[in-house]
Each structure stands twice: as structure tokens, then as C-alpha cells.
Amino acid sequence: MQSAQIWSISIGGLCHHAWEMPIDVFEKHMLSSYIAAPAFIICNGLTKSSLLTFYLQVSPQKWFRRVIFVTIAFVVLYTIIIASLLLFGCQPRETAWDPYLFATGKCIDYAVMYIIIAVANIISDIVLFAIPMPMIVRLKIPLGQKIGLGIMLSIATITVTTSIIRMIYLPSLLGALDIPWIAAPANVWSFVEVNLFIICGCMPTFRKFFKRFAPKWMGSSSDAACSEPPSSDLLQKVQRKKHTGYTQFDTCGSLELAIYPDTMSSSSETAYAMESLHEQRCGTDSPPDTERQEDVSQSPTDSLPPTDRGKDAYLALMCCTMAQLPIWGYSVSFGIFQEYYSRPGSPISTASSGTIATIGALQQGVMYLMMPFAFLILTRYPRLRHLCGPLGLAVTVASLTASAFVNTIAGLIATQGALYSIGCGLLFCPISHYMNEWFVERKGMALGVMWAGKSGTGIAMPFVFDALLRRIGLKATLLAWAGASAAMTLPTLVFIKPRIPLHTQVQVQPLSFRFLRHTSFWMMQAGVIIQSLGYLMPSTYLASYASTIGLPSITGPILLALFSVASVPGGIVHGMLGDKFSATKSVTIASIGSALPIWLLWGLSLDLANLVVFVIVYGFFAGGFSSTWSNMSTDIQKDDSAADSALIFGMLMGGRGIGFVTAGPLSGALLQAKAHLSNQALGYATQYGPMIICTGVTAVFGAWAPIWKGMRVALGTCKSR
């Protein structure tokens, strides 16, 4: 692949205009590009397939291996399809490189194909990161080693950044004739990505390096006897025992046995024997197989699937995460539609920008504000949950379809703003209820993965909608998204199911609202509202801020994409921390981690490098704040044990809605507070200075509940003296 790219660059160079090249040189350059493009996607697919094959040796559990095989099939399928289109997309085929055939031949739009490649890479890279995370969570090793292992296994996701940066340059190729000049920046990042392919493909060999130079990172057994290799006689004895299940990561064995292929037998029988042997010699939290057999005669709940583990729980988590794409895909990309609606040729071009922005404000504001009422109804009447999803899908598709034929601002506010938001809210509520049933001890991790799905949506969808609006127009884009939403949502509604069967649930569930009388709930709710006031300000105004300080126009989209990329691991890590620590600690970490980069990086410099570091650090911590809500629910339930955690979750989402709706007028007032620029090279010196200060303050007071607890302790100490 590198040879093909170097060959292409050696012929055509970089940043050469097409009219500067002789015809024969231009033809050779186009031929080399024609060869390099399918070679790129094939190498990409082979790299991902090799990593997925490596994952197959992580655990012999059937559900895990099925997920791997499905992902491999997806990667192989899109690799074959895209490579075939790149190779045979022109009729006659020579049209791809022969300039004399450009006028008579027909070709697919290769720029669109390159955008599709970038989107497919982003999706598959995120999947590669997410697949081993449940296994890492279940490892019985220190938290620091879990985080280090997660970072090592997430090396493959580095290519997400290069794919996003390439995607920034690709839309300019749509309809372009001077391809050698315009494609040069994208080619540079493609070359970087190819080298990352090599690094990622060598990832499994990192074990030997870290074992030699950083052995503490590899983990060890807590019992010396556990680290001793079993004898072959004892291993054969254990292999002869009949077994009914496998829980590779519930053992106290070493990290090498659990993760690395060269320390595991290729036979699942041997793997199970190793695990059983560890149970005998080291002990385990899991009871013997004979004790795992469920006695359905004792209690109706005995026959229920287990929480926090097993294929059913992780299937529900996967469906819930996938559903975030149709739920949030349009709302997180509304900036693209707002820019389109403001163009002279749009049907509502005469409307003010503030009126157009009302559509986007309603999409998230109405959805969040309806959550307390929707969760209240679905918690009170659990048998309505299975009807809520299909109803939400119908409302969503109907509102998008209707908006495609509306030409007035009032009609778009009603369809794209209010109705669409209600439909997405009806989709979101039942699947969140199901997550509450499936995950108890690892609810923070599950919630983090779910919010990571929302953040991942913001990585690719703005570029997809931008390309669609350029190519097929507004009406076709809305209809296409309506169809895509239905196609993506239907499988999740089919496969996701409640842990408690519908026929065993009572028609009316009694609810407890005693938690509303306790100060702890209102202090946490106040923190959520305050944090939400400033949370969206950086992502909303970073593009205009970059333009104001003289950075290129392409800087804004890159910063926003990096913010979404950082929010994906941020949500997962904060969820995992929430399962280990109290709400006070996890909320404080997220709040302080969000405030420091605002004040030290955004406010103290106008440099692009500092802005890049800022959006990554801020995206990681601020993007993970909502993953701490499971911790908040647990603390609130200490005051009211009968309170339903799903109802508390809905109340907290309502608080976020209040913050989001209030943030719009607040940000406008902050921009008017200092409407001139200063000569000082500081973000505080710009017209965005008050906004930067306010955003940092709201980030700190997102931890209002811990601050309030600390003040109570301090006051109590003073009074006792």
C-alpha cells in the first residue's frame, strides 16, 4: 500500500495543479491513484480482520465469538463492496485514468466513495475499541491495570482521528476537476493512516515488549499458587470433568491467560480446564456449576437471565448503543442543516438565524424536558414500554417525511423540532428502562457505553449530512434519513427485550417519591443543571471562535470532531470509575477535569495546538459527566430505597434539558458582554472571554453536591468547636 502511494506521489507530486502536468504524466498519476485507492481499502480491511482474529483468542464464550464473527463479516463485506466499486466504477474502465475518455465515459463519484470509506473506518474502529471493553471490566486486576490494558487495546482507534481529518478535506473533491491539487492534504493523511495500519497490526506483539520493560503493567495473580503453571496430569483430570458454561474473566488467573493468545490453548476445552483449575486452586467468586443450576420452583425470578453478564445483557447493551445513532444523529448534526437553511436558495432563507436555530434547540430541549414525565409513566405502567418504541419510530419517520414536503419555518419547527424530538424521546425511554433492568453492579459502565454511542454519532454524521445535502438536496436527504432511521431502529426493537418478562410485570407499579423530600437529590439536580448551562458552549462556538482568532475555516469542524472522539472513551471510563467509587469522587473528577482545560488552555492562549489539547481533554471529562448519573441514582436511593433508579435518571435528564434551554439566551448575553477584541494573545481577551469564564465556573459547580457536602462538614466542624 505504501509503495502504491509513494508511486502515485512520485509521478504527480503533491499540490500540483492538473493543468501544470503534461498529459502523459497526468494519465500516469490518475492510473496510480486508481490502483492505490482499492489497495488502501483492502489493506484497511485486512488490518482490522487481523485484530478481530486476535480478539477471538481473548475468550471462548459463544456470544463473544459471535460478535467477533459478525464484525469480521461486516468488515470483509464492506471491503469487498467498496474495492469492487473503486475498481469497476467506470464504464469503460479506462475512463478512470484516461483524460481522453473523461467526456464520453461514465464513472461513479469517487469523492462520495472516499467519504463512505472514511465513515466505514470510523464505525469499525469504534467497534474495535468497544468489543474487548466488557472483558476488561470483568478482569480481576487493579483498576490502573484495567485502564492501561484498555489504552493498549484501543491503539487501533488512533485511525479514527486520521479518518476524521481526511473527511474534512474530502467534500471539496465533490465535482472538482483539479483533483491532484485538491486531494493533496487527504493523500498526506492517507499515508499517515497506512503507517498506523502497520502499528495496529503489530499490536498483539506489544505484550512481549511490556512484559520485558514494564512487567507490573501485565498484572499478576493475587495468590502465589495461582501463578504456578498447572501440571499436565492435573490439567487432564480437570478436562475430563463435564461443564456447562465458561466464565473466563471471572477467574483470579493472570492477565496473560485471559488476554494474550500465546498463553492460551487454541482449544476451548483446554481453556475451560485452565479456568476450572484456577477455581480449585485460587478460589473464585462464582459458585460451582452444580450451585449455578437454577431451581425454577423456588421463585419466579430464579429463571431470569443474570444481570451484568451473559449474552442477553450485552445484546441489550449493544442494541441500546446502536439505537443512539437514529435517536441523536440528526440533532447533533443540525448545525449542517442550519447553514443549509441560511443559504439564499433554501425554502426558509428569509427567516432569521435565531428563528432557524429554534428548530435545533427544540430537538434536544423538548426531548430532555419530556424525560421526567415519560419515565414516570413508563415506570408507573411498565406494560406500556413495549408499545413506546414502535410508536416513537412511527412518529420519527412520519415527522421527517412530512418535513421533506414543508416549505415554511413554522412547519419545520413543528415537524423537525417538536414532533421529531417527541418521537426520539419515545424511542429513548424504553431502551433506557431495559438497561436499568439488565445492569445493576455495572450500571455505570453500561451507561458510559450508551453515552459513548451518542458521542460516536457526532463524529461521522455531520460529514455524512453535509455530503448528502450537496449531492442530492434537502428533500431527498430527509427522506433518506427517514428510511435509514427505520432500518437502523427496527433491528434494535426486535432484539432488545426486558429482563423481566412482560406477562410477569404488574399493570400498575407503585412509585416512591420520598427522595424528592431529601436535600441530596436537589443538590445533585442543581449540579446537573449548572453543568448543562456551560456544557454545550464550547462545542457550539468553537468554530466561530477559531474563525475569530484567524485560524483556517477547516479548524472548526476538526475541533468538533476531536471533541466527539474524546467523549467516546470519556463516557466509558467515567462509567467504569462510577462503578468503583462514590458519586462524590466520580462527579468531582469529571467537574475539575472539565474546568482546568477551560481556564488553562482555552482561556490562556490563542494557539491552535492548545485548542486541540483543550477539546480532547475537555471532551474526555465533560463528555463523561453524564455517565456519573448512575452513581447519583445510587446515592439518592440511600435516602429512599424504594425509589426507582430509572425514574431518578429521567429526573436528571430533565435537569439537563432545563440547562440546555437556558444556555441559549445565556450564551448570547455573554457574547454581548464584551464585543471587542484585545491585542493580548489570550482567549480571555477576545469577545468570548466572559463565556470562557462562565463555562469554567459551570464546570466546577457541576460538582455542587460534593461542594455542598463539604460545606456541611466544615460548618459542622466549626459549630462543634
Image (cartoon, rainbow, N blue to C red):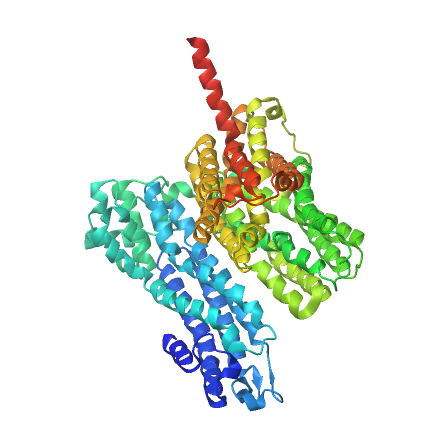
Question: Which residue sits at x=67%, y=49%?
Answer: 424
Res 205 → quadrant = bottom left
Q: Is residue 658 above or below residue 389?
A: above
Horizontal side of residue 577 vs 111, given as left or right: left
Question: Which residue sits at x=32%, y=52%?
Answer: 258
Q: Position of residue 21 (x, y in %)?
A: 48, 84
Evaluate whether residue 348 shows in this view: yes
Res 12 → quadrant = bottom left
- Residue placed farthest to the front in the image? 679
Q: Position of residue 637 (x, y in %)?
A: 54, 28
Which image quadrant: the N terminus? bottom left
- Residue placed farthest to the top in the image? 721
Q: Is residue 629 above or below residue 480?
A: above
Between 479 and 72, the one lying in front of the other is: 479
Between 430 and 698, the one lying in front of the other is: 698
Q: Position of residue 373 (x, y in %)?
A: 69, 37
Which image quadrant: the C terminus? top left
How many marks the image carries: the answer is: 0
Horizontal side of residue 28 vs 388, given as left or right: left
Q: Is residue 316 above or below residue 579?
A: below
Evaluate whether residue 642 shows in this view: no
Res 650 → quadrant = top right
Q: Is residue 362 above or below residue 705?
A: below
Q: Position of residue 131 (x, y in %)?
A: 44, 55
Horizontal side of residue 134 vs 149, given as left or right: right
